[in-house]
Image (tube, coloured by chain):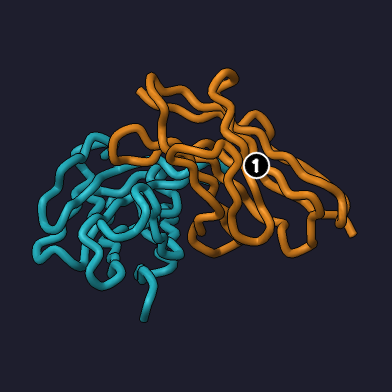
Chain colours: A cyan, B orange
Amino acid sequence: GAGVSQSPRYKVAKRGQDVALRCDPISGHVSLFWYQQALGQGPEFLTYFQNEAQLDKSGLPSDRFFAERPEGSVSTLKIQRTQQEDSAVYLCASSSPESSAGELFFGEGSRLTVL
Amino acid sequence: AQSVTQPDIHITVSEGASLELRCNYSYGATPYLFWYVQSPGQGLQLLLKYFSGDTLVQGIKGFEAEFKRSQSSFNLRKPSVHWSDAAEYFCAVMGSYIPTFGRGTSLIVHP
């Protein structure tokens, strides 16, 4: 497809389970962002990749959160030992050098519910 | 550090009425400013952006926004709201390379 694709769209996990969320950015987009959006809140920055390099992970809330983009395209956000406060929508966005600086193209998000 | 304040959590307007959504930012220099819209179950879509130059910028779907440096504001406006404009609106500021978003304003449109 032409847009940013995220999977799964919905994930229910029991507390303590590990989850993996996938993001397939727009082809050719070198920049990739992960954001966390809690209910009723705006997106909060988690981490940023340029190609395969993770240039900024300052927004990851704990060492239970890990992101990778090994080949510079698809990215995976992994959350270990999930907690109830991890419940949120996880948004992936990508951008290219050719697009206007700062213009992000967002996926529809992965909604994580931790019971 | 950069930050965005959207003081209105909810705004209710009648269809056909004008709209203004407020956004105030904090950043040391002139930032890049954006408005995004999010419909239920959808990702965010860019409405418009300001980088430099003319302080009144036009976007998609008939929206416009005005950058006012003296007030550190970037308010979004539309002269006549349609029912399909009901959505969540997010203002964002970018100083370096990472956009920071406000908490959003939910627009409710009454027929």
Asked whether residue B67 is in view, the answer is: yes
Q: Residue furthest front?
A: B53
Q: Give the percent coordinates (x, y) of residue B109.
A: 81, 54
* Quarter location, residue B59: bottom right
Measured as percent of width and height from the top left, residue B110 is found at 87, 55
Figure disc tally: 1
What residue sits 69% from the left and 33% below the top? Answer: B8
Q: Name which residue lies at 35% across and 44% down.
A: A83
Q: Which residue is mark 1?
A: B76
In this rendering, the answer to whether B78 lies above or below A56 is below
Q: Residue at x 45, y 65 (%)?
A: A108
The amino acid type of the residue labelled 1 equals: Leu
Residue sitting at the far bottom: A1
Residue B96 shown left or right of residue A57 in the figure: right
Q: Kindly identify which chain the residue marked by label 1 belongs to.
A: B
Is B51 rendered above or below residue A77? above
Residue A18 in view in this figure? no
Residue B79 in the image: state x and y as whole percent: 79, 49
Query: Could you say which is closer to the camera, residue A80 or residue A3?
Result: A3
On screen, residue A15 versus residue A65, left or right, reads right
Going 31% across and 51% down the picture, which residue do you hit?
Answer: A34
Q: For numbered disc 1, what is the local secondary structure?
A: strand
Query: Where is B102 relative to A51, above or below?
Result: above
Q: Is residue A38 left or right of residue A60?
A: right
Q: Which quadrant of the figure contains the N terminus of chain A?
A: bottom left
Q: Position of residue B90 (x, y in %)?
A: 55, 44
Say which of A85 and B70 sits in front. B70
Would residue B24 be found to the left or right of residue A105 on screen? right
- Snapshot quadrant of residue A95: bottom left
